[in-house]
């Protein structure tokens, strides 16, 4: 099938590459000329396991191309996926300017039937806005061309995006019941056929329910994280181990183990903005989502948990103190730094006068770029952040090590070497990578999240 993907970011590039891998003929459009040039020269703008090989293979086979040519992109695909960003607006609502711009472009150039698929995460009712924008453009040029707007939200996880796209738990598609909607249904069914060979994974529904499903999923996952983080902070106070509690509750099949890890807060391009956007949608309809307001507030506070623990241990004034930081990306296997907890901790340490040696396996360049934006006096602040070549390099002479991202490579360090390098053997572990009892045996002062278990010996 001939497919156009509008927006060649995390979701667009993965969707385009995976659909090409299945034999489709894919046209990837982006407004960012540099991104398109990079892709056309064989480069890849994001770190995502397996993606580079798929893009290279399909580019060589002529099944995927990258361009900024809007007219050609509209001409190419009978199915037009909109996968542009939907960042938060100042009031927390999803900023739909890129989605609407993409829709207008389609309306401006389309000459035959199109299925316009909202793959971006968009608030309930966005399909109507997309439809209106396309109709306006058609009217402006006196054209009468049929189309249908479909919702097909994306559930892939950064860091496992290719795997998630290729082996989805579910595919959610919302179509309307007009004749065009039925035509769209048939085309979408065909497109996703290869994903449903083993068993049917597609949930067909109305457009608004499909739009809502994406927000409900992210809101639920964010809720589980904030719930555990709040309990972890209490566990620290009462002397219980949140990991033991997680096992104790996760074994209940009604609860399950996933997404119950306590830590130093969730980040990324989705949970923070989607929780906010859903709250905002509710407010527009006169409803206050009390649970989600708390989820957001707990998370914002939780991003300060390591900074607070460090201040409790070393005092308010950190001038002249030097720390090591492992992990910058908001989660492992990605270089995405959007809303990353590391930015909050770095901000806190540097503003209090400390210097920090940092290491991340893939997010160092992206970190350099975003940290420039985080500080009013970036030049001065960045002088106190040293980017290191290895985790062990970062430890040299530091008062303590803080861990923010649970990269696999941090899980079994050489603790003897770690103790030699650090000024004192102290770890602030924002992802609970280590066992407190093992740390105690190794002679390491260990500060996890919700792991200050009190043991009473007879
Ligand atoms: N990143 C994720 O893990 C993830 C997962 C599921 C859903 N989503 C949702 O998917 C959407 C895209 O997210 P992302 O992380 O891929 O964003 P991104 O910022 O990585 O990519 C968006 C791309 O769209 C391009 N763009 C903007 N306007 C355009 C236009 N008019 N025409 C063509 N290209 C245009 C930008 O230049 C950019 O390259 C968002 O709504 C997001 O919430 C993201």
Image (cartoon, grey):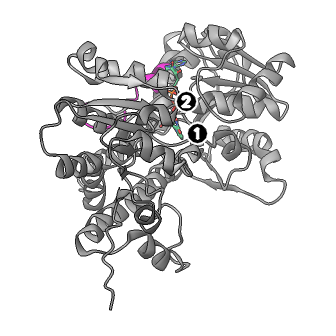
Judging from the image, what secondary structure is the residue with disc 1 in? Answer: loop
Quarter of the figure with residue 440 = bottom left
Position in image of residue 162 (x %, y %): 69, 39
The reply to whether residue 70 is visible in this rendering is: yes
Mark count: 2
Image quarter hosting the N terminus: top right
First in residue order: circle 1 vs circle 2: 1
Cβ of mark 2 under 8 A from ligand 1: no
Label disc, if present, on residue 333 of the rendered structure: 1
* Residue 76 included in the magenta stretch of the image: no
Viewer-nearest residue: 264 or 144:
264
Q: Which residue is mark 2?
A: 362
Which residues are the magenta region? 90-101
Q: Position of residue 265 (x, y in %)?
A: 36, 50
Residue at 50% of width from left, 53% of height from top?
Answer: 213
Counting from the top left corner in percent of width and height, residue 41 is at: 70, 8
């Amino acid at each position: 099938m001939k497919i156009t993907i509008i927006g060649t970011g995390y979701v667009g590039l993965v969707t385009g590459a995976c659909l090409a891998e299945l034999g489709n003929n894919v046209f990837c459009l982006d407004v960012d000329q540099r991104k398109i040039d990079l892709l056309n020269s064989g480069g890849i703008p994001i770190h995502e396991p397996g993606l580079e090989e798929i893009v290279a293979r399909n580019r060589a086979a002529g099944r995927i191309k990258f361009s900024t040519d809007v007219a050609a992109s509209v001409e190419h695909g009978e199915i037009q996926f909109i996968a542009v960003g939907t960042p938060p607006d100042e009031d927390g609502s999803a900023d739909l300017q890129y989605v609407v711009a993409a829709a207008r472009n389609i309306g401006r150039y389309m000459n035959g039937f199109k299925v316009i698929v909202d793959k971006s995460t968009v608030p309930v009712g966005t399909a109507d806005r997309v439809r209106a924008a396309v109709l306006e453009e058609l009217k402006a040029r006196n054209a009468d061309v049929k189309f249908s707007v479909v919702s097909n939200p994306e559930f892939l996880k950064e860091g496992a995006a290719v795997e998630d796209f290729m082996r989805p738990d579910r595919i959610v598609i919302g179509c309307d019941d007009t004749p065009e909607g039925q035509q769209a249904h048939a085309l979408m069914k065909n497109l996703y056929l290869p994903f449903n060979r083993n068993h049917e994974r597609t949930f067909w529904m109305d457009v608004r329910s499909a739009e809502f499903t994406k927000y409900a999923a992210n809101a639920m996952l964010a809720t589980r994280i904030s719930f555990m983080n709040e309990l972890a902070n209490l566990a620290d106070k009462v002397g219980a181990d949140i990991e033991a509690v997680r096992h104790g509750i996760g074994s209940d099949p009604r609860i399950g183990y996933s997404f119950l890890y306590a830590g130093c807060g969730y980040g990324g391009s989705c949970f923070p903005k989607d929780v906010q956007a859903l709250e905002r949608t509710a407010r527009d309809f006169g409803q206050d989502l009390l649970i989600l307001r708390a989820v957001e507030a707990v998370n914002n506070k939780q991003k300060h948990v390591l900074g607070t623990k460090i201040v409790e241990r070393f005092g308010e004034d950190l001038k002249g103190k030097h720390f090591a930081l492992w992990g910058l990306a908001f989660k492992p296997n990605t270089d995405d730094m959007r809303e990353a907890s590391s930015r909050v901790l770095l901000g806190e340490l540097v503003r209090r006068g400390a210097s920090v040696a940092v290491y991340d396996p893939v997010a160092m360049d992206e970190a350099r770029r975003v940290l420039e934006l985080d500080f009013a006096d970036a030049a001065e602040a960045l002088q106190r952040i040293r980017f290191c070549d290895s985790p062990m390099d970062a430890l040299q002479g530091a008062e303590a090590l803080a861990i923010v991202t649970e990269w696999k490579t941090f899980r079994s360090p050489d603790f003897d070497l770690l103790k030699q390098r650090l000024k004192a053997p102290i770890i602030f572990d924002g992802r609970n990578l280590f066992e407190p009892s093992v740390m105690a045996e190794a002679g390491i002062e260990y500060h996890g999240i919700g792991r200050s278990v009190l043991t009473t010996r007879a």
